[in-house]
Image (spheres, rainbow, N blue to C red):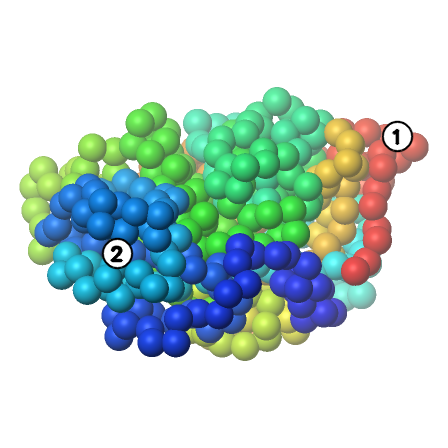
């Protein structure tokens, strides 16, 4: 089901350009497996080089053959994206100040369409749900803290958010779009946001959620636009210092620029010199203090039923990679797996907010749906324990996980203080007669 759905998404989008790629690709241009944004490249400049000088030289020498698209924050990722005419690619690649060039791959959402709800009970109670539990029923109890997620910003890097949905209680806002449009015309991002922070189907019900639209309404997006969204999140975090969780329910073929960008954001701290994790080990004193916390990143493992090592950015070691389980407490058949999957969360038959009105909900499945459960749990942990460094918060998350009989670790919300609510028969901020519940499958 997922394969056909993903294929329809990938075939429905028209990416820029139909020209053939240059036949003589320079050796330092990294190819991307799968669909690409033709003639668009991500150019990584040496950390020791002046990126502004590199760009200026290329613009002067190549004129209309070179068009700058994104100029990323140099402290975060010393790179830029540009549209380069095939005839000029060798000129760009020959600049000695350029570390590497990558094709601009197209990534996609990681959701499949299905029918019904559950999940919050599993992440707030130890042990599997009773045998033969009905995933279509809204009869489960969620134990939570009323202040869960307070003082935390959750950034949904996705298709956007229906910020007017009643499930957000005014806590949702638009932040940035790399694709022009600002509304969620797909629903995927809204669904993820509702699971992370929604007032009825969400985990962290006092957190704020910000839309970072990097995917089109067809559910696909270029690497360069996704990095631009990450770049914006880093800028916001550096500017306001508010603890931040970034949820990325997207993925694609292995992709070096995206992996580097995601890795970098995990160790970025306002006012700090950017350091990768292996560089922090030998650091001491004020420098280590400056990078004591970064943005906490959750990423969907992917829905290909294979080792997550083959999926970007899920295979980045510094992020929290999330697989999906079913109501029977087993790995969902579609969920990627392997040593790089850190934790699992409910991902099959998940109900959350949707698009089309302020009350509509929808039931879908995927590691995309599991990931915002974990983003919400991280927000809860931050509000209870403070903004720990990403590695420490990750350890706290993993140490508190509840394990299935097969050994899969399931994310759990903090145990105290909590308020129990019964969501049996309820809908997103409305009675059954008032709510619009979408149950279409694709």
Q: Quadrant of residue 129?
A: bottom right
Q: Position of residue 134 (x, y in %)?
A: 82, 58
- Relative placement, left or right, of 130 versus 73 is right
Q: Quadrant where the N terminus lies?
A: bottom right
Q: Quadrant of residue 220?
A: bottom right
Frontmost residue, 30 versus 231: 30
- Whether residue 33 is visible to the viewer of this picture, yes or no, is yes
Mark 2 Cα shell of 10 Å, populated few (<14), some (14-19), many (≥20)? some
Residue occupying image coordinates x 30% and y 47%: 63
Frontmost residue, 4 versus 414: 4
- Whether residue 120 is visible to the viewer of this picture, yes or no, is no
Determine which of the numbered discs, if any, sits on residue 44 in the image: 2
Query: Is 393 situated above or below 240?
Result: below
Determine which of the numbered discs, if any, sits on residue 434 in the image: 1
Residue at the right extreme, as displayed: 433
Q: Across the whole image, how many numbered discs are drawn on residues?
A: 2
Disc 2/disc 1 C-alpha distance (Å) = 52 Å
Frontmost residue, 51 versus 267: 51
Per the image, label 1 sits on a secondary structure element best described as loop
Q: Position of residue 354 (x, y in %)?
A: 72, 41
Residue occupying image coordinates x 17% and y 60%: 95
Q: Position of residue 197 (x, y in %)?
A: 58, 36
């Amino acid at each position: 089901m997922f394969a056909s759905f993903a294929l329809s998404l990938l075939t429905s989008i028209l990416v820029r350009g139909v020209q053939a790629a240059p036949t003589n690709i320079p050796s330092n241009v990294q190819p991307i497996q799968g669909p690409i944004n033709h003639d668009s490249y991500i150019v990584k400049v040496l950390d020791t080089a002046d990126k502004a000088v590199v760009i200026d030289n290329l613009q002067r020498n190549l004129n209309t053959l070179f068009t700058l698209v994104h100029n990323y924050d140099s402290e975060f990722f010393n790179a830029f994206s540009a549209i380069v005419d095939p005839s000029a690619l060798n000129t760009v690649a020959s600049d000695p100040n350029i570390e590497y060039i990558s094709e601009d791959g197209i990534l996609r959402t990681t959701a499949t369409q299905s029918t019904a709800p559950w999940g919050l009970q599993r992440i707030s109670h130890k042990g599997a749900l009773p045998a033969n539990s009905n995933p279509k029923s809204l009869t489960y109890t969620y134990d939570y803290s009323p202040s869960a997620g307070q003082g935390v910003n959750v950034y949904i890097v996705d298709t956007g958010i229906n910020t007017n949905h009643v499930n957000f209680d005014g806590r949702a806002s638009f932040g940035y779009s790399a694709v022009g449009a600002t509304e969620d015309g797909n629903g995927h991002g809204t669904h993820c946001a509702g699971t992370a922070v929604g007032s009825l189907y969400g985990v962290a019900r006092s957190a704020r959620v910000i839309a970072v639209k990097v995917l089109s309404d067809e559910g696909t997006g270029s690497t360069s636009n996704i990095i631009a969204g990450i770049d914006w999140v880093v800028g916001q975090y550096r500017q306001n210092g508010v603890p931040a969780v970034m949820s990325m329910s997207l993925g694609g073929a292995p992709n070096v620029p995206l992996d580097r960008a995601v890795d970098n954001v995990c160790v970025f701290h306002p006012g700090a010199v950017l350091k990768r994790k292996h560089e922090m080990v030998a650091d001491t004193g004020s420098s280590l203090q400056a990078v004591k916390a970064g943005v906490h990143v959750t990423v969907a493992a992917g829905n290909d039923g294979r080792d997550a090592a083959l999926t970007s950015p899920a295979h980045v070691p510094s992020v929290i990679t999330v697989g999906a389980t079913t109501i029977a407490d087993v790995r969902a058949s579609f969920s990627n797996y392997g040593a790089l999957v850190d934790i699992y969360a409910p991902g099959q038959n998940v109900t959350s907010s949707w698009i089309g009105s302020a009350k509509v909900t929808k039931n879908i499945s995927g590691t995309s749906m599991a990931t915002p459960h974990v983003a919400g749990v991280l927000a809860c942990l931050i509000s209870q324990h403070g903004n720990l460094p990403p590695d420490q918060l990750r350890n706290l998350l993993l140490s508190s996980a509840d394990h299935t009989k097969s050994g899969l670790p399931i994310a759990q919300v903090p145990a105290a203080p909590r308020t129990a609510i019964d969501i049996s028969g309820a809908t997103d901020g409305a009675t059954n007669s008032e709510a619009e519940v979408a149950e279409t499958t694709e």
